[in-house]
Amino acid sequence: MEYVSELGLDSGLTAVVGAGGKKSTMYAAAPAIDRAVVTTAVRIPPFEESVAELHETTDPLAALENVKDWPVGLVPRYEENRYLGYDFDTIASIADSPIPDAVLVKADGARNREFKAPGTDEPKIPPAADRVLGIVSTQVVGQPLTEEYVHRVERVAELTGLSRGDSITTEAVATVLSSEDGTEKNVPESAEYIPVLNKVDDESALETAREIAAIVLERSRADRVALTQLLDRPEPLVELRD
């Protein structure tokens, strides 16, 4: 899969943050990697159907020794309809193990919204991350700044200057993706930051995504921006802008 190799997801530790396709991104990438681990630093809904095996364990290194089929999910325990996340040291130890080729980590939540800005205690990006994917749904452009589409409306308003109910612009999306208080928050200095504009479902969305990418490449630390479409498409990567 070009998507996996182009973004380097087939090796090292990749943290995924933002909104509009975090889990779908991990679940699409994992089967294209020979030995991928899907895990989390935060709460995550059940995902047994998206991996070949799932191990609920406080000793993930021991679990790795017994994996028969890949990709594998590793989580510490189940609580209130969600799996909990591992601490940073445990995630680093999973990534340091010679058994998996790559580790994919969910590092924040968005309550199934299309766009978000992080709260005070997030994202929980492991310091050992080699790269961070910052995801947003391109489809949020033109929608109102409300809880229907956006997680943490007030934080997005604060960063962009929009008011609640205003139409979300390409400028607003690019501003959040490019801000150290937005999607870039807590990205380790040693990690590559790759903004991902997801749900590029048609030509209109493609032009919107290109506009956002151009602004992000001017303002952020990112050297490239991925444009993706994950559903009903064998190759998620629509375009890579740099």
Image (cartoon, helix red, strand yellow):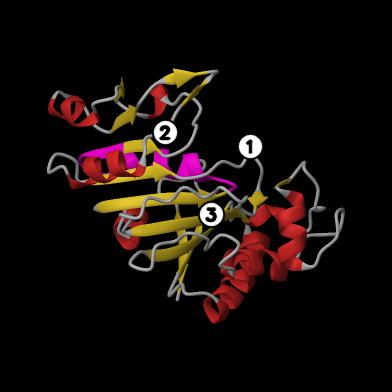
Nearer to us: label 1 or label 2: 2
Q: What amino acid type should be assigned to the residue bearing mark 2?
A: Gly
Q: Is residue 31 visible?
A: no
> Any magenta on residue 32?
yes
Residue at 47%, 65% in the rendered image: 239
> Which residue is nearer to you in this view: 174 or 7?
174
Element type at marker 3?
A: strand
Q: Where is residue 238 in the image (x, y as percent from the top left)?
A: 48, 60
Nearer to us: label 2 or label 3: 2
Q: Is residue 185 visible?
A: yes
Q: Mark 3 points at which residue?
A: 135
Residue at 35%, 64% in the rendered image: 191
Q: Where is residue 105 in the image (x, y as percent from the top left)?
A: 38, 43
> Which residue is nearer to you in this view: 180 or 147?
180
Q: What amino acid type should be assigned to the residue bearing mark 1?
A: Arg
Distance from Cα at disc 2 to Cα at disc 3: 20 Å
Sooner in the amino-acid sequence: mark 1 or mark 3:
1
Vertical order, 203 against 75 (above or below)? below
Pointer 2 local density, CA inside 10 Å: few below 14, some 14–19, many at least 20: many
Which stretch is magenta? 19-37
Q: Mark 1 points at which residue?
A: 111
Q: Where is residue 113 in the image (x, y as percent from the top left)?
A: 66, 42
Residue at 71%, 53% in the rendered image: 140
The image quarter in which residue 200 lies: bottom right
Q: Mark 2 points at which residue?
A: 85
